[in-house]
Image: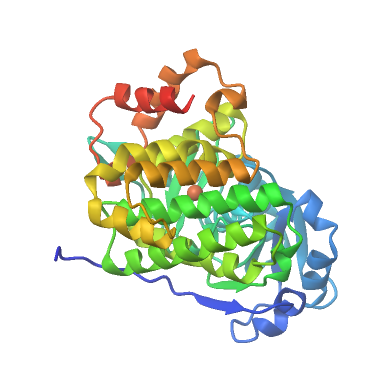
Amino acid sequence: MIPFTHWFPQQRVLFGRGMAADLRRALAEVGIARPLIVCSARAQTTRAVQALAESFGAAAARVWGGVQAHAPLHAAIEGAQLARAHRADAIVSFGGGSASDLAKGIALAVAEGSDIESFAMRREQGSITAAHSSAPKLPIVALPTTLSGAEVTPGFSLTRADAYKLIFRDAALAARAIVLDPELIVDAPTDILLGSGMNAIAHCVEALYSKARTPISSLFAEEGLRRLWHGLASRLEGADSADELLIGAYFAGAAIVNARTALHHAICHKLAPMARISHGEANAAVLPHVAAFNLAECPAETARMAAAMELPDASIAAIATRLHELARRAGLRTRLREFGLERDRLQELAARVFAEPGLAFNPRPIDRPEDIEALLAAAW
Ligand SMILES: [Fe+2]
C-alpha cells in the first residue's frame, strides 16, 4: 500500500430534524453569542432564518442576505466589513455552496483585510502554491440547504469581476460545526436539490479516482455514492429521502477533504461562470464524459463505483450511461450546447481548464489543452 497522511478537520457534525430552529441551544458547547448569519436575499425572509436568528436573542445575530451565485469576491469583502461592524464572534452560513464559500471568504477577509487574492492557489510548473494565512479565523457554523457538501472542506472559491474563479484552501476555514437538519432540504426545489445532488455524486466519483485519495477518503466516497444514488432515485419517485441525501452529501464532502477534486471540477469551475450556469448544472453535463475519459486508469475504483450504483454491469460505458440517465431523469440539461455556449468557445475554455490546479490529482495525465478540448467537444 502507498504511504499516506489523512487529515481530519476539527469539526463537529450535528444531525436532527428541527435542529436549525434552535441553533443556539444546539451549539451551546461551541459558545457563540453574536454571529453574522450569511444567506441569500430570498432565504433572508424565510421563517427558518428568522427562527435561527431569534434563537440568539434580540439583536445578537445579524442577518446578511448578500449571498449570490458563484460567491463574488466583492461580496466577501462587503460581508467582512459587516462582520467587523457587528463585532461578530462567528459566521453562520445558511445555504448551499455559495453561502459556504462566502462564509469562508468573509472569515478570511476579517482575518487578513480586504486584499485576500494573494492567498489563492496557483499552479506553477505542475505544483500548487499559495501564500499561507496564519491569522486566527472566526469559527464557521454551516447549515447546508443543498447537497454541495462545501461546508465540510477547507477549500472554497471566490469569483473575480472578470469571471475568474480564485481557489483557496485553509484548514482553519472548514466549518467548526455542521448542522444537518433534513427539514431544511425537504421542501427544496427539485432542480436545485438534484443539481447539487449531481455535484455530490461527482465529489464521490472524483474522490474515488483522485491521485490524492486515501483508504479513508475512499470509504467516505463509496458510502456517499451509495446513499446519494439511492436517495436521488427515491426522491425522483416522490419519496422523502432528505435524511439519506444530507448524510450522503456530508460523506461526499468528507471524501474530498483529502482526495481533493480533479479534471471534472477543473472543467466545472471554468464552465459554470462562462456559460452563466450553476455549479450543479455544469456537473450534470460534464460528469459522464469525464468518467468515460478517466476510468480506464483505475479498474478497482471503477468496480467500487459500479457496486455503489447497484449496476450489474461494471463497465465504464455502463457507469457513464447511468450518470447521464440520472441527470436526464432529473430534468437537468446534459449537453453544453443547451447552455447557449458556442462551439468556437471550447478552445478558450480548454485553455482555462488546463491552468487549473486540480489537474495535478487527475488519474489520467493531461499533457495538452487539446485533450480537454476533445472531451468538451464530445460533451457539446
Ligand atoms: Fe463540486
Quick check: can you spot residue 42?
A: yes
Residue 37, percent across and down? 71, 63
Left or right of 109 on screen, residue 38: right
The quarter holding residue 56 reads bottom right
Residue 6 lies, with reference to residue 326, above or below; the image says below
User: Residue drawn 42% across and 25% down?
Assistant: 378
Please, which colouring scheme is shown?
rainbow
Q: Looking at the image, which residue sits at the far front?
A: 312
Residue 93 lies, with reference to residue 52, above or below; the image says above
Residue 345, percent across and down? 49, 17
Numbered-mark total: 0
Residue 178, percent across and down? 57, 71
Left or right of 135 on screen, residue 195: right
Quick check: can you spot residue 136?
A: no
Residue 313, percent across and down? 35, 52
User: Residue drawn 54% across and 29% down?
Assistant: 335
Residue 358 lies, with reference to residue 9, above or below; the image says above
Left or right of 160 on screen, residue 312: left
Q: Nearer the viewer, residue 301 or 89?
A: 301
The quarter holding residue 258 reads bottom left
User: Residue drawn 37% across and 36% down?
Assistant: 356
User: Residue drawn 24% across and 57% down?
Assistant: 300
Q: Pick the quarter of the image with the N terminus.
A: bottom left
Residue 277 lies, with reference to residue 348, above or below; the image says below
Q: Nearer the viewer, residue 343 or 270?
A: 343
